[in-house]
Amino acid sequence: MAVKKKLAVFKFASCDGCQLSILDLEDELLTLAQEITIANFAEASRAVLDGPYDLTLIEGSITTPHDFARIRELRDMSKFLVTIGACATAGGIQALRNFADVSEYTRLVYARPDYVETLHKSTPIAEHVPVDFELRGCPVNKHQLLEVISAFIADRKPNISSDSVCVECKRRGTVCIMVAKGTPCLGPLTHSGCNALCPTYDRGCFGCYGPQDNSSPAALTQYWQELGTDPQVMFRLLRNFNPATEPFRSESEKWAPKTPEQ
Amino acid sequence: MSLRIEAAQLGHLLEVIRNAGYDLLGPTVRDGAIAIDRISQLSDLPQGITDEQEKGLYRLRTQASPSYFGFSAPAQTFRRFLQPPTQTIFWASRDTPGGPLRMRSGSNVDSKLAFIGVKACDLAAIGVHDVVFGCDPNPQRPAADPLIKDQLYGMRRENLLIIATECGQAGSTCFCASMNTGPEIEAGYDLRITEFVDGEHWMLIDAGSEQGDTLLSHLAGRPASEDDLTTREQLLERTRRSMGRSLDTRNLPQQLARSFDSPAWEDIAERCLSCANCTLSCPTCFCTDIEDATDITGRTAIRTQRWDSCFNKEISWLHGGQVRKSTASRYRQWLTHKLSTWHDQFGSSGCVGCGRCITWCPVGIDITEEAARLTAGTEASS
């Protein structure tokens, strides 16, 4: 039997939800633990093994000055570095700060804002170090996460499609809620991975997986207008879990409320 | 010979088919649309329900008529039952690294399917797929280039029972008359139903196969009169005249073949979301992706086939990158394949005129408008 590969999980600015998807792999977790050495995973164990690591999963975005050095250090000790989730891959919902004055927030929230060292922008990991694979989602889909881990252990390419949520609706046989019910849905612009969870339960897509590769959002927002969608709703749909990613960012600007505080 | 029956006999027909061991698949109301799902009895059919379809719009409406088949193209096609959206091709496993491989076939085809209420467009689409999947050597195709038979499709198709229905009205996105696939149904069915509501609610039923003859013998009715047959002709003529769309197919393949550099493709790309809804609503699109995956232990591998689309990024990925990066190139691939190169490849058009790509495109791109614009000249206009 070959030496077991070492998996490490580290987090930056995030809610830990993506890491918890690993623990959600209830049926596969024991097998996973048998096949690989879990070298660092704070949500499951205090044990920490030194690098180098064969596969490092990074959750969270870069939001503080000391993150810069830490992510480079982790890159240096990882054979493969994979980002998991919208924060690590796109800056996450906290990238809403990119559109606002962060120092104003810290003044309002903290008694001693001078203790808080934070950046004006939340940025994805790939803006700072080379990333071998980006797994989308808020949170990631546990089956896709298992596929990514299995693929990197086997030295093969992960089977993760970059098509739209519409493809998943059609494969599932879900009737299009936008065409049949007039519900505004971000599905045509959004990267697949959730297996069309929201449209299947009669909710428009929220864009958790970020933009798919070839979208032209203006055509969709025009259609939403024809459906009578409130511009405020359109703005919020585009500025959600992946607000700083193109083309969601630039399209959301068009529908931003014209308020003095902006 | 046509048989004239009371509409209520349809329930008995479904029962006879079910008792013969078939899984019934047909139109039924689900999620605000007429879907193609498993059905078991007459009350599952969308009686008294019709639909309104336009670019990017689908709505159900109730109607006074008690007809069972008074709707146009359902939200889904029968494709998923002959070529499922996801199917395992095989499993391979071994106990030790380098040890012997055990192979197991992935998908079993053990049920007999009966398609109920297949419209003319969808019946034509099954005919198109029969050629694509190598089950029907279309004489229009070059004999020197035989297609390989898709075994899983072939097995499902072999046991298939088709109960087709002729449309008494066309929808506003329908253009089967332009594509020569409807409204009359001439072949390819076991039973053909034409439904009439004219004071009475009755049906004409014809058998198109031995199985159809057997089924027909279970029904109580009387031989159709000359008047009944004339009524059918009149109904089909009305349907033909009510087509909401048309497409001029004269020289269309040749004209589209010359449109490669048209600026219209870029104009369409500004509206197209590249979301793939058109391809996955289409009854003749057939593209799939093959994925090989290992499990976490590395001792089991699975080969899976999944519906894919020419609007997806990976489908044109060859060594070194994507062939079709832009939305314009993807839309051009789709439209010219459907209406032009399909003829060269499979000996027919790839479009049956069901209009689903118009209805289910979230931004309402209309294949008949775009084809007309492309062939009218190369001027882009909106």
Image (tube, rainbow, N blue to C red):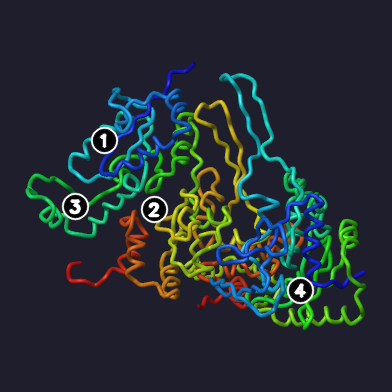
> Contact (CB < 8 A) between labels 1 and 3?
no
Q: Residue A208 carries which label?
A: 2
Q: Which of marks 1 and 3 is nearer the N terminus?
A: 1
Residue in the picture at 92% in, 69% down: B1
Q: Is residue B251 visible?
A: no
Instruction: Kindly report which numbered mark, 2 or 3, lies closer to the viewer in this rendering.
Output: 2
Return the residue at label 3.
A120
- In the rendered image, residue B284, in percent from the top left (x then y), is placed at 68, 59
Total marks in image: 4
Return the residue at label 4.
B183
Question: Which amino acid, mark 4?
Answer: Pro
- Quadrant housing residue B106: top right
* Helix, strand or loop for disc 4: loop
> Distance between the Cα atoms at labels 1 and 3?
20 Å
Question: Which amino acid, mark 3?
Answer: His
> Contact (CB < 8 A) between labels 2 and 4?
no
* Helix, strand or loop for disc 3: loop
> Distance between the Cα atoms at labels 1 and 2?
27 Å
- In the rendered image, residue B34, in percent from the top left (x then y), is placed at 62, 66
Question: Which amino acid, mark 1?
Answer: Arg
Instruction: Kindly report which numbered mark, 4 or 3, lies closer to the viewer in this rendering.
Output: 4
